[in-house]
Amino acid sequence: MKNLSRIANITALGISVGALSWILCLGLFINDIFLILMPVFFMIICIYGISKLIDKFPKYKLTILGSAILWLIIPNFIVVNFYFHKIPETIYQGENSALSYLLTTNKSAFSPQILSFFLGFFVIAGLILIIKGIISNKK
């Protein structure tokens, strides 16, 4: 049981960092405290929630994973739909600094509608995992 809990914590950390790190970076680049604190809040709740739920309901691994996916899609939908206009085209640090760089965000290749449609696939995947977890445990 301890091994399952440890694996669940590592999984929760991995999916949280993967789903939310870009929001945290965006918040740091545009100096928006909401975009800095929101992913941290969602990450803490996800990791804590998964570890507690796996300990309490070890048979419902798929349902818990699907719920975590849905939980982590929320901040992505918020940022894509309400902060898309604030995402810069490029992140540039001039020649006068010790570290000079130019990074592109490739924002022009996407729109909020396309990104929301893409995030919708994750919602479907999360719902499928929840349903599969419930059905497999009813047998």
Image (cartoon, rainbow, N blue to C red):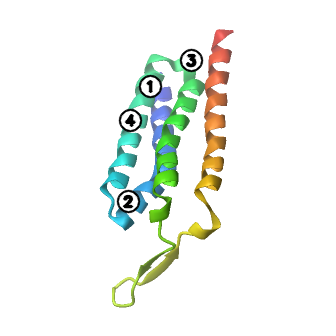
Judging by the rendered image, the residue that carries numbered circle 1 is 2
Q: Where residue 36 is drawn, which disc sits there?
A: none
Quarter that holds the C terminus: top right
Alpha carbon distance from label 3 to label 4: 21 Å
Q: Where residue 59 is drawn, which disc sits there?
A: 3
Alpha carbon distance from label 2 to label 1: 36 Å
Against 139, residue 47 (above or below) is below
Question: Which element type, helix, strand or loop, lies under badge 4?
Answer: helix
Alpha carbon distance from label 1 to label 3: 14 Å
Precedes in sequence: disc 2 or disc 1: 1
Precedes in sequence: disc 2 or disc 4: 2
Alpha carbon distance from label 4 to label 1: 20 Å
Q: Where residue 45 is drawn, which disc sits there?
A: 4
Q: Amino acid at mark 1?
A: Lys
Judging by the rendered image, the residue that carries numbered circle 2 is 27
Contact, CB < 8 Å: mark 1 with mark 3?
A: no
Question: Which element type, helix, strand or loop, lies under badge 3?
Answer: helix
Alpha carbon distance from label 2 to label 4: 19 Å
Return the residue nearer the eye: 35 or 94.
Answer: 35
Q: Amino acid at mark 4?
A: Ile
